[in-house]
C-alpha cells in the first residue's frame, strides 16, 4: 500500500472592515450613534449639541401634529 495523505484545512473568512465613524460635532472618532438622528457622536456634550440642534430644527416645522406633540415634552 502506498502512503496516502489527506490534507484538510480550516477555512477562515477575513472579517469585514468595520466602518469608522467621525463625530458630527468634534470631528473625533465616534463610538456612539444618536438613535433619533443616526448621527455619530463621541462625547455626551456632542450628543447634547446634536439633540439641541435637532429640536431647533423641529421648531421650524409647522402644521405637523406629530412634531407638535413631540415638542410639548420640552416646554
Image (tube, rainbow, N blue to C red):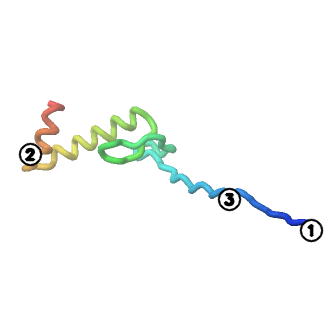
Q: Which quadrant of the structure image shows residue 15?
A: bottom right
What mark, if any, has residue 68 been given in the picture?
Answer: none
Gap between marks 2 and 1, in whole Å?
Answer: 85 Å
Q: Quadrant of the C terminus?
A: top left
**Residue drawn where x is 43% and y is 40% of the image:** 32
Where's residue 55, x and y in %? 23, 41
Between 35 and 56, the one nearer to me in the picture: 35
As displayed, is residue 11 above or below residue 54? below
The crowd level at tag 3 (other Cα within 10 Å; few <14, some 14-19, many 20+) is few
**Distance from Cα at disc 2 to Cα at disc 3:** 56 Å
- In the orientation shown, which residue stands out farthest toward the bottom? 2
Identify the residue under disc 3.
Answer: 11
Whether pointer 2 and pointer 1 mark residues with C-beta atoms closer than 8 Å, the reply is: no
Q: Quadrant of residue 17?
A: bottom right
Report which residue position mark 2 lands on. 65
Secondary element at tag 1 = loop
- Residue tagged by mark 1? 1
Q: Residue at x 19, y 45 (%)?
A: 58
Name the N-terminal-most of marks 2 and 1: 1
Amino acid at each position: 500500500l502506498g502512503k496516502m495523505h489527506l490534507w484538510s484545512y480550516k477555512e477562515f473568512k477575513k472579517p469585514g472592515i468595520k466602518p469608522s465613524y467621525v463625530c458630527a460635532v468634534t470631528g473625533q472618532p465616534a463610538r456612539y450613534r444618536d438613535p433619533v438622528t443616526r448621527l455619530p457622536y463621541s462625547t455626551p456634550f456632542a450628543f447634547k449639541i446634536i439633540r439641541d440642534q435637532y429640536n431647533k430644527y423641529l421648531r421650524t416645522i409647522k402644521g405637523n401634529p406629530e412634531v407638535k406633540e413631540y415638542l410639548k415634552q420640552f416646554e
